Amino acid sequence: MVRIAGSMARRHDDDVIEYMVFTAIWVLNSEHLIGDERYAALKSIPPNVMRRPVTLGDLRREIPMPEPILTTYVDRLLKKGFVEQAPGGLIAPTAVFTEPDMLEGADELYGRMMQMAASMRNAGFSFGDDQTHPKEPS
Amino acid sequence: MTQAVDNRRAALRVTTVEVLKALRSLARLHDGDMFALLVFTSIWSANGEHLIGDSRYAGLRDIGPDSTSIPVSEEQLQRSLGVPRDILDRYVEMFLQAGLVERISGGLSAPRAVFTSPEMMHGANEAYDRIVGLVSALRGAGFALGEEAS
């Protein structure tokens, strides 16, 4: 997970906090779309009207960290155009996700998830085949 | 042969939501500061990355002894997190003061004793549960995690 975050932060000048703050914003914008088949495919990016703006308060609850760090990074994302101020709060606009490097990044993240799944299988983790805690020796 | 449905964006959405939930919850161990959790996690995972695949340290309570820890330098840590050095230094100093991390020859190391505390054990157990929860959420979204991974 640490490796994945480090790699995905490339699009944010390798800064993991910027990547996390950006991620939290788009997650809060689009969490309600989970299960909506119209936006399941890689290139099926939800339009701006489908995005629910996120307030700074929502963001504080989503990714708790010291206030000055959070606001610094929100400002930075606004300046870079990764995030826009919309009525009701912040959104990561659709246009950001249609950029070739963002699409490539989403595909890479998917690939890394698959790799992580394979590594975990190799380490003996059975993916929910037995979703209970393994017995610990007493 | 049927073509696999492209549900990559759906899978990423579900995974990211669950990962953020897990981070938020585990941040409790660091007074609710998610970035502190990330810095600390980066330190201990760098210390023990070479133990992946070592069955001696696979069980929840099979914590590697301090002698197996490979220290991570602050420069390495900064490269892996990419954050401004002053922010990172503040967190490292906080961990050193709290005894969560020690400065040893070669860099920083999270000592074994830290992981044997009931809170940390509980956190590790919760992280495991969260992974299972993630799998379950992905299955609920119709995603067969890893079944087709080669």
Image (spheres, coloured by chain):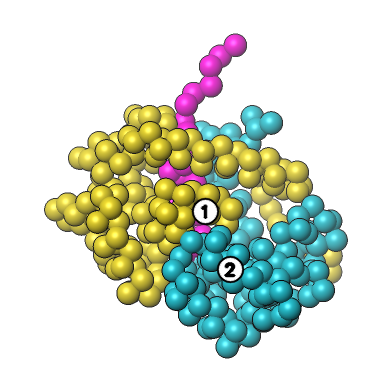
Chain colours: A yellow, B cyan
Was residue A125 drawn as part of the magenta stretch in this picture?
no
Q: Which residues are magenta?
A: B1-24
* One can see residue B56 in this view: yes
Q: Pointer 2 indicates a residue of which chain?
A: B
Q: Nearer the viewer, mark 2 or mark 1?
A: 2
Tell me the kind of residue under disc 2. Answer: Glu
Residue at (43, 43) in percent of width and height? B13
In this view of the protein, can residue A126 be seen by the observer? no
Residue carrying label 2:
B75
Q: Chain of mark 1?
A: A
Where residue B127 sits, quadrant-wise, is: bottom right
Q: Residue furthest bottom?
A: B97
Mark 2 and mark 1 in contact? Answer it, CB < 8 Å.
no
Q: Nearer the viewer, residue A110 or A28?
A: A110
Pinpoint residue A31: horizontal percent, then vertical percent: 36, 47
Which residue matches tag 1?
A: A5
Quarter holding the C terminus of chain A is: bottom right
Please, what is the three-letter code of the amino acid marked with disc 1? Ala
